[in-house]
Image (cartoon, helix red, strand yellow):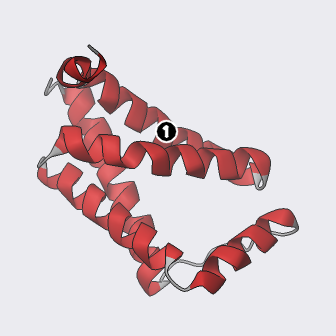
């Protein structure tokens, strides 16, 4: 379960999550603002005052745990609904960002597949 490929996927996903999760908290990367329905949706989430900080903290936590190789089976399952929502947002509202979303979902899916033996008892 610790092949070079799995290690590379885990580290890349961890780095992506730490960087973009931190950006939700500190805003150090310039972000292209979406338009239309995507902008309305993002503005609504931002207006709550808590969604982006909570998701940012979760992403940083999950990313750090992946980089430190701690609780990997737990954090990749914790990431699953977040990564699916990222993908769905880009598929339905902001298609230019779909490549990065597909990358996150693919990396998460690969890691879930690699740890599937640990999840199998949940389905019996």
Q: Position of residue 107 (x, y in %)?
A: 40, 36
Residue 100: tell me if it is visible: no
Residue located at (38% from left, 48% from top) = 79
Q: Where does the N terminus fall, quadrant-wise?
A: top left
Q: Position of residue 86 (x, y in %)?
A: 58, 51
**Among all residues in the image, which is located at the extreme top?**
124
Q: Where does the C terminus fall, quadrant-wise?
A: top left
Q: Position of residue 58 (x, y in %)?
A: 34, 64
Compared to residue 89, the image places residue 25 above or below, namely below
Q: 17 or 83: nearer the eye? A: 83
In the figure, residue 55 lies in which quadrant? Answer: bottom left
Crowdedness near tag 1: few (<14), some (14–19) or many (≥20) residues, C-alpha within 10 Å? many
Residue located at (65% from left, 85% from top) = 47
In the figure, residue 88 lies in which quadrant? Answer: top right
Residue located at (31% from left, 66% from top) = 60
Image check: 69 left or right of 105? left
Residue located at (73% from left, 74% from top) = 33
Q: Position of residue 3 (x, y in %)?
A: 17, 24
Image check: 73 left or right of 83? left
Residue 111: tell me if it is visible: yes
Q: 41 or 102: nearer the eye? A: 41
Residue on which the image places disc 1:
105
Compared to residue 1, the image places residue 108 above or below, namely below
Q: Secondary structure at mark 1?
A: helix
Image check: 48 left or right of 24? right
In the figure, residue 65 lies in which quadrant? Answer: bottom left
């Amino acid at each position: 379960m610790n092949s070079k490929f799995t290690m590379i996927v885990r580290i890349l996903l961890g780095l992506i999550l730490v960087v973009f999760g931190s950006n939700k908290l500190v805003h150090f990367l310039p972000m292209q603002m979406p338009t239309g329905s995507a902008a309305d949706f993002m503005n609504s989430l931002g207006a709550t005052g808590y969604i982006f900080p909570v998701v940012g903290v979760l992403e940083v936590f999950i990313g750090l745990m992946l980089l430190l190789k701690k609780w990997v089976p737990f954090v990749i399952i914790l990431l699953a609904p977040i990564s699916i929502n990222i993908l769905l947002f880009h598929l339905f509202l902001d298609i230019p960002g779909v490549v990065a979303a597909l990358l996150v979902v693919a990396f998460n899916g690969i890691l879930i597949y690699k740890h599937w033996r640990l999840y199998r008892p949940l389905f019996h």
